[in-house]
Amino acid sequence: MNMYEIKSTHLLRKLMKDYFTGFEHAGKIAWCTSVGPAELLRSFGFEVYFPENHGALLGATRQAGDYISSTVNLGYSGDICSYLTSDIGAYLNKRTPLQDHYGMPGIPKPDLIVYNTNQCREVQDWFNYYAKEFQCPAIGIFPPRHVDEVTDAQIMDVSEQFKAMIPACEKASGQAFDIDHFRDTLRLSREATELWKDVLATAKNSPAPISFFDATIHMGPIVVLRGTQVAIDYYKTLWNELIENVRYKTGVVPVESSRIFWDGMPIWGKLRTLSNLFIQNNSVVVASTYCNSWVFDAFDERDPFVSSAKAYTEIFINRSENAKMNMLKQMADEFRIDGMIFHDAKTCFNNSNTRFGLPLRFYKEFGIPVLVIEGDLCDLRFYSEGQTTTKIETFIEQLESQKIVNEYHG
Ligand code: SF4
């Protein structure tokens, strides 16, 4: 087995531990969706907790399956978001991986709950459940969905929704709004997101020094710590390591038989297995829509409300098929992709682009081979290891033979 290792992982572990254990001494705590207005919340001095990150933790530690049935017993369908069902189920059972990993008594309690339906409506139901449980104020931001281009009028609408959050934030935090704090936090977030983009871009090189599976781990700080200097410092360290590896031509595999794009959610409980599967076949998943979702090019501290509204509304998941096709094609070109894998996550149709025929249309329009695999983000009952392994190995073989044919005719 290939022994390639990203050394910054040690630092990442420490930093994530500090982030979680920090909640024990935190002043005011806000809960936020993963692509929600974290910067505005931080500018009020809130420590920010992300339930989706907790859902991913339940998936990665393979505990999700222990808790989903408790939520189903409350009347929720087992077919809806398994972040939601596993997270609420863990709460009902008074369990969290944070107890085992960091000795924490439980999840942090919210003083304010904020969600943005730019990704899905599920977060509204999920977060409102907790608002009732904790008798805590909840605020939603409701941007237009599935748009081709995000218009100025739409951005102004979302920007006003951001501003309308201010009184509730002031009340819950006990701090008056300070535009300079907001600008500073947004600047820190912008710097971190630019560095995260640079980190992902190192995989444009061959051999790629970071795969999608590595990136799902290293994205922790850009999700939970954007808007802090800690995230900036971490991504500088990580980028320096990766760019050094590029210089020495050290990568995930020494010689890449194929370079693959992953669309859709990770299968959290199978990251290592899948990573090894690709490595064994000398193939690398070099880019993904998922990890790219935390690249917010629009952030601009000179116009903090409008630029936040723009950044959080124009994200991939919130766009029309036309926009998604163009974004996918652009990434496929930039990362020199040989084939695309689309993950059809059973409990997240919002982030599964397979249900309305996009993969086939993508193949017909751009000639890039596609493969659809079935699975789920957390609920492994929807995932068949044997079937998926066979499908992926066959796909990689096909890509290799296609390359040989192209080289022969080229
Ligand atoms: S986007 Fe999908 S995985 Fe994420 S919260 Fe919404 S339904 Fe769940």
Image (spheres, rainbow, N blue to C red):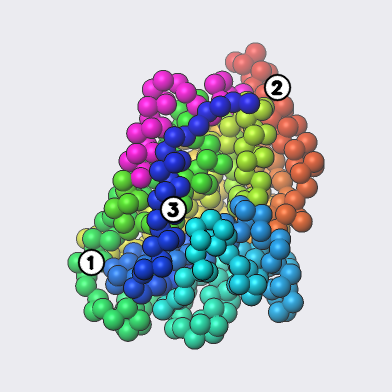
**In-front residue for pair 21/387:** 21
Name the residue type under label 3: Met
Name the residue type under label 1: His
| Label 2: which secondary element | helix
Q: Report whether the residue tagged 2 is closer than 8 Å to ligand 1.
A: no
Vertical side of 63 occupied by 280: above or below: above
Q: Cα distance, mark 1 to mark 3? A: 24 Å
Q: Is residue 323 left or right of residue 78?
A: left
Mark with earlier residue (3, 2): 3
Is 97 one of the magenta-colored residues? no
Magenta-drawn segment = 234-258
Q: Cα distance, mark 3 to mark 2? A: 42 Å
Is 255 one of the magenta-colored residues? yes
Whole-percent x and y of residue 64? Answer: 66, 61
**In-front residue for pair 73/178:** 73
Q: Which mark is residue 181?
A: 1
Q: Is residue 305 left or right of residue 397?
A: left
Quarter of the figure with the C terminus: top right
Q: Quadrant of residue 238?
A: top left
Q: Quadrant of residue 351?
A: bottom right
Mark with earlier residue (1, 3): 3
